[in-house]
Image (cartoon, rainbow, N blue to C red):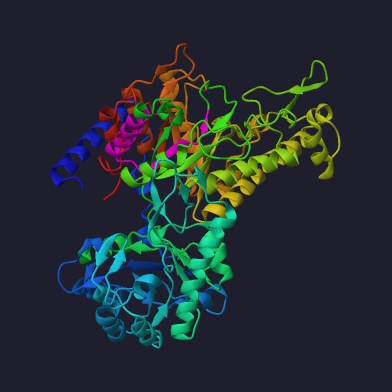
Amino acid sequence: MLNKSLRIGLMVIGWLAIVFCARAGEVTFVAPQERPQLQASKPWPKNHFLVLAYHDVEDDAADQRYLSVRTSALNDQISWLLSNGYRAVSVQEILDAHSGMKTLPPKAFLLSFDDGYSSFYTRVWPLLKAYNVPALWAPVGSWVDTPADRQVNFGGLMTPRAKFANWKLVRELSQSPLVEIGAHTWASHYGIVANPQGSHEPAVANRFYDKVSGQYENDLQFIRRIDNDVRRVTDKIHQVTGRSPRAWVWPYGAANGTTLDVAKKRGYQLAFTLNNGLANVRDLDNIPRLLIAGNPSIKAFASMVARIQETDPVRVMHVDLDYVYDRDPVQQTKNIDALVQRVYDMKISHVFLQAFSDPLGDGNIQSLYFPNRWLPVRADLFNFVSWQLQTRAGVRVYAWLPVLSFDLNPSLPRVQEWDPQSGYARRATQPYQRLSPWNAQARRQILDIYEDLARHATFDGILFHDDAVLSDFEDAGPDAMAAWRAAGFQGDIATIRHNPAELQRWTRFKSQALVELTRTLRQGVREIRGPQVKTARNIFALPILEPKSETWFAQNLDDFLATYDWTVPMAMPLMEKVPQSESDAWLTRLIQAVAARPGALNKTLFELQARDWSRKPQNAIADQQLARWMRLLQLNGVKHYGYYPDDFINNQPDISRIRPEFSSYWYPDHD
């Protein structure tokens, strides 16, 4: 965190910038009282609850190898919660609320403890009894099962056996109404080799890569390995306690949809991650938890809890993996290191990372950066770079993929454009050649590609590319027209275009079809990678500024806000042929159009342009101009924004010049 003098200095600089810009009439200043207020002062939504994730508890120094907190700190934290209106609830109460049998109290919280440390018996349980507070305890079966005369292999760290509980303690604790015994896997709390580059990723959430054979685990092998683990820990807990566990706790917080399906078939009713935020009783497959580590002070703890509803500012670098790829593995490694270092230095939150290859820049996608069934693999690179960014740079990674512009088999129908001059349909080429979204075989192969990404890579979200568009002359192909008639409508595009009411229905029909396709892709990804995967989708600026232009794009802002976690307007004035001198006013109009919808700014991420594609050759946007646009976004109440593209090789934009306006670490928008 910045020191006080530097923070004050930045505030003064920011105030001077506001005064200057206001005098120049170049930006619209939003007064503090008119900006969105912090969520901390608002009641929690009904039937939401907070889960606190603990590990070991120690009387003396808190050993961070085990994410420990001190006993005195835990005592103070429970006391603070109960003294400030928070109400402890049990796993059973959460399940009862889920089934509609009861309503959770306001500010409900659940304590959870991972791994199976003996300190849960010696230090935590006495506090639970003293405060009459329930908790979830989720041991790793193989650690608790370790013989008394051996050390516990704690992820490669050989640990004294006494640090972990035994099954006798598990049995005794299970008889307390205050303790729910969950499962933290039998022996899958470790990392496996998950790609050709040798990344070690959570075993329960990723497929093993065999360097000898050059093959990944297939579906059957992965499911068999996971089911053996889940069955073993479930059976053992049932044997010891007389009850089957109901709560599944992901090692490292890393979830997986296939594993979740296996666990649910074994009787698990709740699954806990390590994502931040409040949990909702309606979604027990994806329960976030606030990780308590580093033995925080009571002030720091109180701040974390009080701010649990706040959404941290999202700052995104949009990266082309084509810049990273190199035939020379030595140079490619240098490129990856440079990218990771740059992202780390920028202190941002998210990276939108290209998962496809488009070296010609024509949007005709002929190869991918992950193993799949339908297109060549330029390099099995996406998972490695994504993991490096997540673990070394500490950011969330969204896989950026097209929706329709895959260059699949020529026999698959493409979007057809009706030509009013000839009266005939022809293959559309602008803005890209696209597969017809109404063709069942094309949809199946697109879904296959998304599912294969989910099988072979770890990521936090999906960014749907801007290729999911249809003009008012599209799609004139037979599959589209057959779907139109099957929906109860009549006529071809020629007649539709001459009837305003029919044209409006045709427009909505297409917009909703594209949204429905992305919903299908999202569901396919989540079934394999997990329900925690977020979605974002690019939207052109014109459908926001001029809603009637939905006809030209088949994109609708309200549809996007209702469907995706993030709506990503391409806030790129020069791409829209707006003179640079008028770009501030244009961006302000765009922001105001979004802000007119209540709460929309909280789900919208504005993406600026870092390159001027209207010039030949293309020029990088001046750092000062990009920083100015970022400042304008902030002054108009925008918290979430990013830019495309990031040229990390040539340091464009120059991070030293844009970082004060871009990094929430360097210039946070709130304490």
Viewer-side residue, 376 vs 564: 376
* Residue 497 spot, x, y in % from top left: 78, 28
Q: Residue at x 52, y 45 (%)?
A: 215
Q: State the residue lying farthest toward the front.
A: 212
Residue 558 seen in this snapshot: no
Q: Is residue 333 on the magenta stretch?
A: yes
Quarter where residue 475 is shown? top right
* Residue 251 spot, x, y in % from top left: 40, 62
Q: Residue at x 60, y 52 (%)?
A: 523
Q: Is residue 339 left or right of residue 612?
A: left
Residue 421 seen in this snapshot: yes
Q: Is residue 333 left or right of residue 432?
A: left
Region of the chain picked out in magenta, as a range:
332-357
* Residue 541 spot, x, y in % from top left: 54, 31
Q: Is residue 324 on the magenta stretch?
A: no
* Residue 267 spot, x, y in % from top left: 56, 73
Q: State the residue lying farthest toward the right.
A: 490
Compared to residue 235, the image places residue 558 above or below, namely above
Compared to residue 222, the image places residue 271 above or below, namely below
Compared to residue 497, the image places residue 462 above or below, namely below
